[in-house]
Image: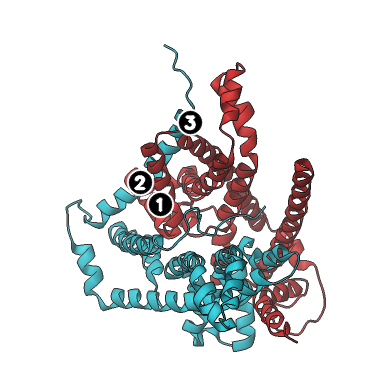
């Protein structure tokens, strides 16, 4: 009986988190247009609409492309920054670290607005070039890549780099063949974080995007203002799909990481 | 002349990027906040903000909403994180994932789901703007509060708790005198993750039909009206608030902290 209350609490919180998402998932397979209405029959109409509607398809593909491109650039920049900063003098290092913290603690809305004022208002960069949008998303993501790579640098054995040099490797070779491979887990998790941050962003996107381009966030917000039920219920399908993708990715990552942990353990023995 | 490769030089692109697109924009914001359309220096934007009852009301409403949301998140997240961290469950890590997984689903879609439920329960959701906004923000930010709390509670040295018990403290006393003080860094980190976004994330309010402005809505409306100077002043005021929060929280928080936004691999 002692354990009953904590379990009940966890169940209540889980209900609060998942009931809206799961109920929306159930209704996405019906022809109902409001949640809570009676279910007359099941249909895949919403899912067909999601891929048949050109506007919706472009919006989804655009969001994914933006996330992948900006996360890739952010990963390269952030990793180089972390490696270079780590081996720099104390002053450079701490200045780089402080500058890196600014977008992390700053509100997204201020970051987005300030980039908009600098690039679009002051310098007159055309929004339609996607440059302000790309810059905004890289500013959003790169600091978190930097923060993911840094701990791996601290854990690394510095003698390995020196040993590579002693054995005749050039500094560049030592860096790419010895240092970089050890940073891969940090770089990968930084990249994943960058992708999720970019996918979730609303404010930076709104203030820097070309007027005809929409990401999932800006599209959903606009759609809730409009009254098109067909779009509304198609977005339920999108929400359900994203939920399923997240579940699958989390399970896969957990499986691979526990496998890796086991391998590490065996290697130690 | 051949420039010799030095690994320190690798940070040059990133440093240049940060100067150009992080520091420079903030300087431009400060410049715009204190100038008018003709580019003349002026305090008008600052005076306009603090002399209008509308904008002061917005500031107060933002704080009220943000503090209520933060307290709600804390009230839900602390017991959850505590149970998860202290449970004897063998794979508590997997259980934690269940609670923070929504973090990776687009927030506009999650708020859409919440809105449908609230509409089904309440009928006209516009009738309860404040409560619905608090529910919406809590729903949005809860995972960001659970994660840092869980991390700090997990790190807690079990020997300290046992020592306190052996020395005669009852369970409540152990919690109040040992567990709670030691989890302060987690609480602080969670608060910073929730407090600031709930002052600025006006999309949650818009989607739940709350037409009252918060600080973020002001920037949004100035953006739509091309009023860059007034918008910059609001951004600057937010920056000052952020700076103060950071100064206060830095005294309590852990050093190696990326604000709870870590991906778990």
Return the x and y of residue B19 as percentages of the image width and height.
37, 41
Return the x and y of residue B56 as percentages of the image width and height.
29, 75
- Quadrant including the N terminus of chain B: top left
Q: For mark 3, what is the residue?
A: B10
Return the x and y of residue B33 as percentages of the image width and height.
26, 57
The residue that appears at 34% across and 77% down in the rendered structure is B60
Q: CA distance from mark 3 to mark 1?
A: 21 Å
Q: For mark 2, what is the residue?
A: B23
What chain does badge 1 belong to?
A: A
Secondary element type, mark 2: helix
The residue that appears at 52% across and 53% down in the rendered structure is A212
Q: Check disc 2: other Cα within 10 Å, few if <14, some if 14-19, many if 20+.
A: some
**Viewer-nearest of labels 1 and 2?**
1
The residue that appears at 55% across and 39% down in the rendered structure is A153
* Mark 3 or mark 2, earlier in chain: 3
Tell me, what colour scheme is on the image? by chain
What chain does badge 3 belong to?
A: B
Does residue B208 appear in the picture of this structure? no
Q: Which hue is chain A drawn in? A: red
Secondary element type, mark 1: helix
Would you say A239 lies left or right of A105 here?
right
Q: For mark 1, what is the residue?
A: A102
Q: CA distance from mark 1 to mark 2?
A: 8 Å
What chain does badge 2 belong to?
A: B
Q: Circles 1 and 2: CB distance less than 8 Å?
A: yes
């Amino acid at each position: 009986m002692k354990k009953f209350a904590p379990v009940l609490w966890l169940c209540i919180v889980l209900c609060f988190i998942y009931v809206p998402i799961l109920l929306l998932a159930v209704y996405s397979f019906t022809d109902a247009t409001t949640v809570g209405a009676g279910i007359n029959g099941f249909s895949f109409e919403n899912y067909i609409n999601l891929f048949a509607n050109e506007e919706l398809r472009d919006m989804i593909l655009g969001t994914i492309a933006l996330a992948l491109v900006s996360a890739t650039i952010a990963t390269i920049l952030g990793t180089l920054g972390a490696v270079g900063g780590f081996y720099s003098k104390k002053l450079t290092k701490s200045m780089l670290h402080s500058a890196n913290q600014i977008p992390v603690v700053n509100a997204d809305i201020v970051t987005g607005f300030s980039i908009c004022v600098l690039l679009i208002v002051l310098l007159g960069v055309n929004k339609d070039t996607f440059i302000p949008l790309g810059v905004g998303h890289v500013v959003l993501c790169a600091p978190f890549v930097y923060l993911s790579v840094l701990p791996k640098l601290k854990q690394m054995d510095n003698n390995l780099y020196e040993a590579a040099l002693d054995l005749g490797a050039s500094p560049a070779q030592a860096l790419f063949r010895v240092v970089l491979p050890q940073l891969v887990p940090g770089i990968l998790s930084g990249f994943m974080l960058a992708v999720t941050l970019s996918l979730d962003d609303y404010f930076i996107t709104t203030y820097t995007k070309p007027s005809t381009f929409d990401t999932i966030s800006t599209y959903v917000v606009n759609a809730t203002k409009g009254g098109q039920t067909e779009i509304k219920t198609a977005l339920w399908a999108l929400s359900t799909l994203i939920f399923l993708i997240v579940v699958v990715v989390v399970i896969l990552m957990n499986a691979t990481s526990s496998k890796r942990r086991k391998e590490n353990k065996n290697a130690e023995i | 002349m051949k420039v010799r490769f030095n690994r320190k030089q690798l940070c040059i692109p990133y440093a240049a990027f940060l100067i150009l697109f992080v520091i420079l924009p903030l300087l431009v914001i400060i410049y715009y906040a204190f100038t008018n359309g003709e580019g003349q220096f002026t305090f008008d934007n600052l005076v306009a903000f603090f002399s209008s009852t509308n904008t002061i009301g917005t500031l107060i409403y933002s704080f009220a909403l943000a503090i209520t949301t933060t307290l709600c998140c804390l009230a839900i997240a602390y017991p959850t994180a505590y149970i998860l961290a202290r449970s004897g469950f063998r794979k508590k890590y997997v259980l934690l994932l269940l609670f923070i997984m929504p973090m990776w689903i687009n927030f506009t879609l999650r708020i859409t789901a919440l809105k449908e439920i609230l509409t089904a329960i309440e009928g006209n959701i516009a009738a309860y703007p404040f409560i619905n906004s608090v529910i919406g923000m809590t729903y949005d930010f809860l995972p960001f509060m659970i994660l840092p709390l869980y991390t700090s509670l997990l790190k807690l040295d079990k020997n300290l708790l046992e020592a306190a018990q052996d020395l005669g403290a009852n369970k409540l006393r152990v919690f109040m005198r040992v567990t709670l003080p030691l989890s302060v860094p987690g609480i602080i980190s969670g608060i910073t993750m929730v407090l600031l976004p709930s002052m600025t994330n006006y999309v949650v309010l818009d989607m739940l039909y709350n037409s009252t402005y918060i600080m973020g809505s002001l920037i949004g409306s100035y953006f739509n009206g091309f009023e860059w100077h007034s918008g910059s002043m609001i951004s600057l005021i937010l920056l000052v608030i952020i700076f103060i929060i950071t100064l206060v929280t830095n005294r309590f928080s852990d050093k190696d902290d990326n604000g709870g936004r870590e991906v778990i691999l």
